[in-house]
Image (tube, rainbow, N blue to C red):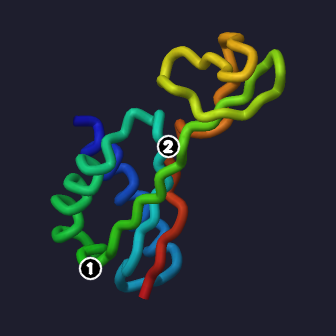
Amino acid sequence: MHELAIAQSALQQVLREAERAGAGQVSRIVLRVGALSGVETDALRFAFDALLPASPAARAQLEIELVPALARCRDCGHDFAPASDTLFECPRCRAFGAELRSGRELYLVCIDCA
C-alpha cells in the first residue's frame, strides 16, 4: 500500500510548511490526484485518517481533487479521454501513441492554517 508512504510524505511537507508559516494548526489539506497516477484515493484517505490524529494537523480536513486523464493525438491533434491507461488510441484517426496531457498528477495544492 504505497498510499501510506504518499500520505506520510505529504503530511511531512504540510507540517514543514505550517511550521515555516508559524501556524499552530492545519485546518485543510488539498491534494490533486490524477486518474492514471496509480493512487487509490480511498486508500489515501484511509492513510491520512490514520496519520492525522497523532499530528498538529489532527483536525485538518482532507480534500482530494481528481484530475481526469486527457491525451492528445500526435497525428491529428485531437484531444480525448483515453479508454485505458496503457494504449492511447485516438478515437478520431485510430492512431496509437498519443501524448498524455493530464492524469498522472500527484500534488499538494493547498494548506490552510490557523
Task: Name the residue beneath numbered marker 2.
Answer: 34
Residue 51 position in % (x across, y down): 20, 60
**Nearest the camera: 19 or 113?**
113
The residue at the point 51 percent across, 73 percent down is: 20
The residue at the point 52 percent across, 68 percent down is: 110
Residue 4 position in % (x across, y down): 25, 45
The residue at the point 46 percent across, 40 percent down is: 35
Q: Is residue 28 left or right of residue 2?
A: right
Q: Is residue 64 left or right of residue 104?
A: left
Q: Nearer the viewer, mark 1 or mark 2?
A: 2
Residue 96 position in % (x across, y down): 66, 11
Q: CA distance from mark 1 to mark 2?
A: 25 Å
Q: Is residue 93 left or right of residue 108?
A: right
Three-letter code for the amino acid on which mark 1 is drawn = Arg
Tell me whether the residue at label 1 lies in contact with that at label 2, contact meaning CB atoms closer than 8 angstroms. no
Please tell me how crowded label 2 is: few (under 14), some (14-19), or many (20+) other residues with Cα within 10 Å.
many
Residue 73 picture quarter: top right
Task: Name the residue beneath numbered marker 1.
Answer: 59
Please tell me how crowded label 1 is: few (under 14), some (14-19), or many (20+) other residues with Cα within 10 Å.
few
Three-letter code for the amino acid on which mark 2 is drawn = Gly
